[in-house]
Image: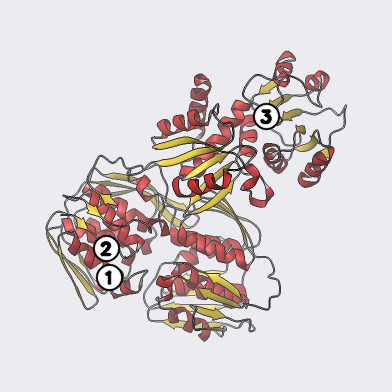
Amino acid sequence: MLFEPGNYNFNSRLNFGDKSITHRAFICGALAEGTTEIENACICRDTLSTADCLKKMGADFVFRGTSVTVYPLKALPSRNEPLVLDCGNSGTTARLLAGVAAGLGIRAVFKGDASLSRRPMDRVILPLREMGFDIRKTDNALFVTGDSTCVRDERELSFETLSAQVKGALLFAALVSGGTIKITERVRSRNHTEIMLSHLGARIKTDGNEIRLEKSRIKGAKLKIPNDVSTAAFFIAHGLLGDGAVLNNVGVNPTRTEYISLLKESGANIEISNEKNVCGEAAADISVTRSALKPFICRKERSRLLLDEIPALAVLALTAKGRSKFESVGELAAKESDRLAGVCGLAKSLGADAAVCGDCLEIYGKGYIEGGQADTLNDHRLELAAATAGLHSKRGVETSFGYADVSCPDFLKIIGAEKFRLGLLGGDISSSKSPLLFSLFSDYFSVPLSYELFETDAARFDDTLKKLKTYADGFNVTMPYKSRLSPDGMPSNTVLNKCGRFLPAVTDGDGVVLSLAAHKIDVEGKKLLLIGAGGSAAAAARALADRGAKLCFANRTQEKARESAIRFGGKIYEKGVVCDGILSFVPVFDRLLFADEKDVAAAEFVLDAYYFRDTRLLQCARKYGKIAVDGLDMLFFQAIKAFEIFTSVKASDTDTEALYALFRSKI
């Protein structure tokens, strides 16, 4: 892929949740008592590996774009064979879950791809063994954990150097085994695990370099995750070399911001504003303007705090005339690739002199980036570095770009080099209003996208899905295909395609609830008649039941109505029962079904999901002066939620009102 200078519009509306915090949020959600709801999670290849392993251990996950609900571990069934936990490319997954599996006494075989299999695991195995847990190396796997009795007495461990991943593994092992642990770090490491455990109610204290976790339990909660400062490093570099950038809600945990401090010392114009606390984590907005930089001198004590940012710093070092030196960065050789050699090779391929001297990296910048062909070693951070360099080079940078989704799948969209490719999957969809809606959203939020109609039939459905997996970032689904991609048996109308896998979601329920709310209708305690038993009716029933509505069900097939009543805790509708609201989800427009004029006259409101023409139910409601909510309202509100799932852009109340008025004016 060729990255070259061009007219790119950086999109500050798009989010890129912190990967390190997301791993820990997923794990804590699985270990907590009760449900955990996570906002702005990083959905990437690495964090999906963590979710997959936790699912095998008994947790459950529901994805709605970057909003994720985690249901805790259930008791594992007895097994003759150990669990096989595939960690993919993620060292964080392997090391953190080593502590969880060992602490719970789960027999598990941890595996990974070729890259992960080359990375050192003794650093987590040995401390866990020192705590008394059954974990050991084995052939053809990263390591295995056993089902021996967990150690519950107090352990006191001291480490000269300790990575945040290993520290997290020890804390999780102590937490789930009911033990107490005191860890002494000679040199501080990232403290995301400690912050999250404390936020969720664990009895954990930090005093200088000492961390003490006592026997405790954590409780599920609502967690908000700031944007990832390590990913932001590339966007900051992009802004410093170009027309500036504004990054919102970025994590500025003091253990993660040495990169910014070093840049400021070298002449970067960077402002931190709107500082706040997000579930215990420091976050802020970062504004960057074009800056001329001096070469970097990064000493040993600083280097270990910005290892992930070395590739971004290397790009900037190319533009700083003179020698930049990064001391004690040998740990880079043990990353997903030999990243130390990779950064050095990248600098050379782009026209600079560079060398690795022991565990130090030196780059001799010319004051500009020449460009060229770069080998990024299938390493996500090297790919992001090469892409960033190419946008500000003299002749462009050609490189592979297949691994960015390890940490930031939407990188190209954020820098303005690619648009979202969305669409609608279904049959007989030529009259759909969805292309109009997404065009309005795109223009309003300045988020470039295309929205296509993918018409299909039963015979071509599987082939169409294969095309969408390689082409689209997400798509909506209409009947009769909603049930073909269904989480928990709930027919899906919105599918996010992330890292080569489909993540189905349902927004029909949002459409109903938000439509009613827009008409000042509160459903709590209201008796509602739901007509129909399809996907939209089921989604509406779940959403309405969750908000305290009392549901009655009617359907042409009595058995379907009975199933809905059992599933959502309602009753079968009996003629003559007065209902506060009547909601129809059947494609009938020329007559009333189940409810007659007398029933409509007694109701407070009606909603009809059919939107291709005015319906008899809506006409009858208006005749008696009742609130009449049409299907276009439902379509609008479910679409704006789908847009959020696809792009991570959340509409404010003001945005929603403006877009609603614009949409109604267009039809």
Q: What whole-number distance in Å separates the C-alpha atoms at marks 1 and 3?
A: 60 Å
Q: Secondary structure at mark 2?
A: loop
The answer to whether residue 536 is above or below residue 321 is above
Q: Residue at x 46, y 62 (%)?
A: 46
Residue 480 or residue 525, whichever sits in front:
480
Q: Which residue is mark 2?
A: 375
Specify the amino acid type for callout 2: Asp
Residue 518 shows in this picture: no
Q: Position of residue 155 (x, y in %)?
A: 54, 83
Residue 122 shows in this picture: yes
Name the N-terminal-most of marks 1 and 3: 1
Within 10 Å of disc 2 (Cα), the crowding (few <14, some 14-19, many 20+) is some
Within 10 Å of disc 3 (Cα), the crowding (few <14, some 14-19, many 20+) is some
**Mark nearer the viewer, 1 or 3:** 1
Q: Quadrant of residue 304?
A: bottom left
Q: Position of residue 373 (x, y in %)?
A: 22, 58
Residue 462 or residue 135, whichever sits in front:
462
Q: Quadrant of residue 219?
A: bottom right
Specify the amino acid type for callout 3: Ile
Are the residues flagged by discs 2 and 1 in contact, CB closer than 8 Å?
Answer: no
Name the N-terminal-most of marks 3 and 2: 2
Q: Secondary structure at mark 3?
A: loop
Q: Position of residue 159 (x, y in %)?
A: 41, 81
Q: Residue at x 27, y 70 (%)?
A: 340
Q: Which residue is mark 3?
A: 521
The answer to whether residue 504 is above or below residue 407 is above
Residue 516 or residue 383, whichever sits in front:
383
Specify the amino acid type for callout 1: Leu
Q: Which residue is mark 1?
A: 340
